[in-house]
């Protein structure tokens, strides 16, 4: 009975934290874009739903970390490798070189992250090719590089957060937010990479 009450209280705390963070994120977005614009009901609902889902994932993940089946070491190894692969892609774009190999190298590094997301029971946010239907070949290439650079930046931040999670045996909401962004961008990169393989070079 005490365990059940403790878990219920824990969920309530997480729910309150989620609502607080969702509110602050919406306030920041409103201030930085248009001080006169009020968030729509749809935007507020979507943000609330996302934070509520993360709270649920956080509860499951906290339990999982105490007896995680797969090692996080491959993720730690892949993070600096991802930076090198991103630098190679950036150089290929700048030199107008063949982009197929640099893109494949990045895609190969996604596996340890995919495995870790699966362990955390994280669901990928859908990405559609329709998002890029009006992009030119050059825009596709630049968007692919930008996405890789954004993943790399978030991975560098997540490295410290993941190490803290490993030491504590629990994963924070902040870490889950970063991982969610990385997971979405990984899916985005995969779609773009298929297009880049056909484009081959920035000038083509």
Image (tube, rainbow, N blue to C red):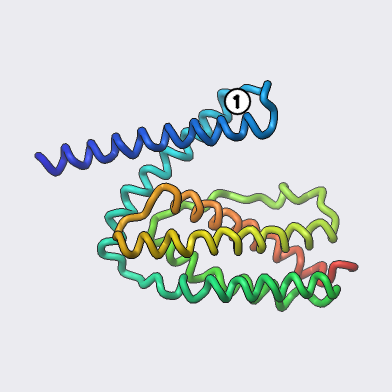
* Quarter of the image where one finds residue 15: top left
For label 1, the SS is loop
Residue 135 vertical position relative to residue 14 in the rendered view, above or below: below
Residue at the image point whose x is 54% and y is 64% from the top: 156
Left or right, 8 with respect to 177, comes to left
From the viewer's side, name the closer residue of 11 and 155: 155
Residue at the image point whose x is 51% and y is 70% from the top: 111
Left or right, 148 with respect to 75, comes to right
Q: Quadrant of the N terminus?
A: top left
Residue 130 vertical position relative to residue 52 in the rendered view, above or below: below
Give coordinates of residue 12: x percent, y percent: 29, 34
Give coordinates of residue 66: x percent, y percent: 26, 61
From the viewer's side, name the closer residue of 16 and 117: 16
Left or right, 132 with respect to 115, comes to right
Label 1 Cα crowd, 10 Å radius (few <14 / some 14-19 / many 20+)? few
Give coordinates of residue 103: x percent, y percent: 69, 72
The residue singled out by tag 1 in the image is 39
Left or right, 163 with respect to 198, comes to left
């Amino acid at each position: 009975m005490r365990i059940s009450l403790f878990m219920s209280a824990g969920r309530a705390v997480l729910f309150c934290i989620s609502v607080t963070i969702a509110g602050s994120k919406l306030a920041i977005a409103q201030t930085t874009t248009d001080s006169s614009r009020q968030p729509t009901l749809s935007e507020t609902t979507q943000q609330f739903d996302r934070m509520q889902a993360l709270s649920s994932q956080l509860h499951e993940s906290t339990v999982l970390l105490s007896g995680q089946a797969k090692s996080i070491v491959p993720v730690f190894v892949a993070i600096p490798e991802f930076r090198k692969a991103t630098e190679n892609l950036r150089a290929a774009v700048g030199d107008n070189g063949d982009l197929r190999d640099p893109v494949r190298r990045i895609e190969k590094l996604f596996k340890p992250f995919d495995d870790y997301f699966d362990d955390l029971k994280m669901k990928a946010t859908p990405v559609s090719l329709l998002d890029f239907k009006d992009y030119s070949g050059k825009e596709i290439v630049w968007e692919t590089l930008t996405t890789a650079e954004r993943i790399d930046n978030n991975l560098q931040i997540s490295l410290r957060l993941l190490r803290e999670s490993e030491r504590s045996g629990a994963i924070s909401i902040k870490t889950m937010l970063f991982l969610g962004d990385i997971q979405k961008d990984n899916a985005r990169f995969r779609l773009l990479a298929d297009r880049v393989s056909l484009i081959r070079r920035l000038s083509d």
